[in-house]
Image: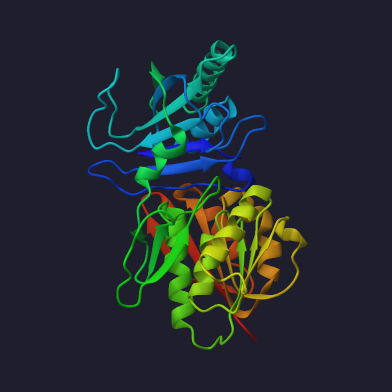
């Protein structure tokens, strides 16, 4: 299961939170950025309670991000994504090649227009991708869903690599051995370590920082930091200076709070601006974005890396591998290693010195 709650489109800076696997359903929470005029979780203006129209869609995995983003754009206050191993119990059957999206729309004067827009959008996807199965649609009225607390039950402490454990601030966890515990309160920002793109990034940076002893004082840049999870993890792994950049003001605020929670604010600087305004050099850059954004930024990011430094990029799906490799495997940059999980790919490149 995934729970999405309004955030700006991943193409502009992602804010995804995935939650703890539960039984045979992979649960995962995705928080999307605030829309103007909409109360955030915890506000008293309605507490997101009342009547809601639950929309259940069966869609191809390759369309999940696009459809979930469209749902938030038309006003969905929450969206769950379920990857089921068997048939849905709702009004339609889900094939092995489809996933389930459940969106929640408020009952208001715009509801009819929103539903019409959704149907038009789904029809357009069917025309654009005739080889994919046509999305299925079912609706149901629900009452008094407390979004402010409901999603938290899915976010539990999770070991994301050999040493790193991600823990929500409201959960208890007793560290063992060499555990590096990173506490995260995601608020409305992306990053809990449970989405493959984030988890693979954490695995890659842990491997690089702990194994490469030639770099004594790591300087790290985290692009599109969200909750700050990657930058904070780098600091906890021993990086001396970490710069976290995000164009989302709220995400930057959340990252600062998380840096304080983890007692690394003396080494982690959070910057609320575009990464193209950053011009200092780094030993490691990590960017968990999308192929489109990574390709757009590749020249700038590669120019910021010191000789023998590393670039870790994630948020890439299989079909974009060739484009990514053609842009990043150039000049002094060589492939250090790749990590894959299902359709997701994480690359680690190294810039060869003279």
Q: Quick one: quadrant of the N terminus?
A: top left
Image coordinates for residue 347, horizontal then vertical, percent: 49, 63
- Can residue 139 be spotted in the picture? no
Where is 91 relative to 174, above or below? above
Number of numbered tags placed on the structure image: 0
**Residue 220 appears in the figure:** yes
Q: Nearer the viewer, residue 25 or 297?
A: 25
At x 67%, y 53%, the residue is 296
138 with respect to 123 (left or right): left
Q: Position of residue 118 (x, y in %)?
A: 52, 20
Looking at the picture, tell me which residue is in the foreground, 185 or 89. 185
Q: Is residue 254 above or below residue 350?
A: above
x and y percent of residue 147 in the render?
Answer: 45, 34
Dividing the picture into quadrants, the one containing residue 117 is: top right
- Taking the image as shown, residue 279 lies to the left or right of residue 289, namely right
Coloring basis for residues:
rainbow
From the viewer's side, name the closer residue of 143 and 20: 143
* Residue located 65% across and 86% down the image: 354
User: Horizontal and vertical percent for residue 95?
Assistant: 28, 29
Image quadrant assignment for residue 227: bottom right
């Amino acid at each position: 299961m995934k729970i999405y709650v309004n955030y700006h489109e991943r193409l502009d800076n992602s804010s995804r939170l995935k939650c703890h696997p539960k039984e045979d359903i992979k649960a995962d929470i995705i928080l999307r950025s605030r829309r103007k005029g909409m109360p955030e979780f915890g506000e008293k203006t309605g507490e997101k309670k009342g009547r809601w129209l639950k929309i259940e869609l069966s869609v191809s995995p390759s369309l999940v991000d696009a459809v979930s983003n469209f749902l938030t754009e038309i006003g969905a206050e929450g969206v769950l994504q379920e990857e089921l191993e068997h048939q849905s119990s709702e009004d339609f059957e889900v094939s092995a090649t489809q996933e389930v999206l459940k969106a929640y729309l408020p009952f208001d004067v715009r509801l009819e227009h929103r539903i019409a827009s959704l149907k038009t959008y789904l029809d357009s996807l069917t025309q654009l991708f005739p080889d994919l199965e046509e999305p299925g649609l079912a609706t149901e009225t629900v009452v008094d869903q407390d979004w402010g607390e409901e999603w938290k039950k899915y976010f539990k402490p999770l070991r994301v690599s050999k040493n790193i454990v991600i823990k929500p601030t409201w959960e208890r966890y007793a560290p063992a051995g060499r555990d590096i515990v990173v506490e995260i309160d995601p608020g409305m920002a992306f990053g809990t370590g449970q989405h493959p793109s984030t988890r693979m990034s954490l695995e890659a940076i842990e491997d690089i920082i702990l194994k490469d002893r030639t770099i004594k004082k790591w300087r790290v840049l985290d692009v599109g930091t969200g909750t700050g999870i990657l930058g904070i993890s780098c600091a906890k792994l021993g990086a001396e200076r970490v710069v976290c950049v995000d164009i989302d003001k709220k995400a930057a605020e959340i990252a600062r709070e998380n840096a304080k929670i983890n007692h690394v604010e003396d080494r982690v600087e959070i910057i609320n601006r575009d990464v193209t305004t950053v011009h200092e050099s780094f030993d490691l850059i990590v960017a968990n974005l999308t192929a489109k954004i990574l390709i757009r930024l590749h020249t700038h990011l590669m120019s910021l890396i010191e000789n023998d430094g590393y670039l870790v990029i994630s948020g890439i799906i299989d079909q974009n591998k060739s484009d990514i490799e053609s842009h990043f495997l150039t000049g002094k940059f060589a492939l250090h290693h790749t990590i894959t999980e299902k359709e997701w790919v994480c690359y680690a490149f190294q810039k060869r010195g003279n």
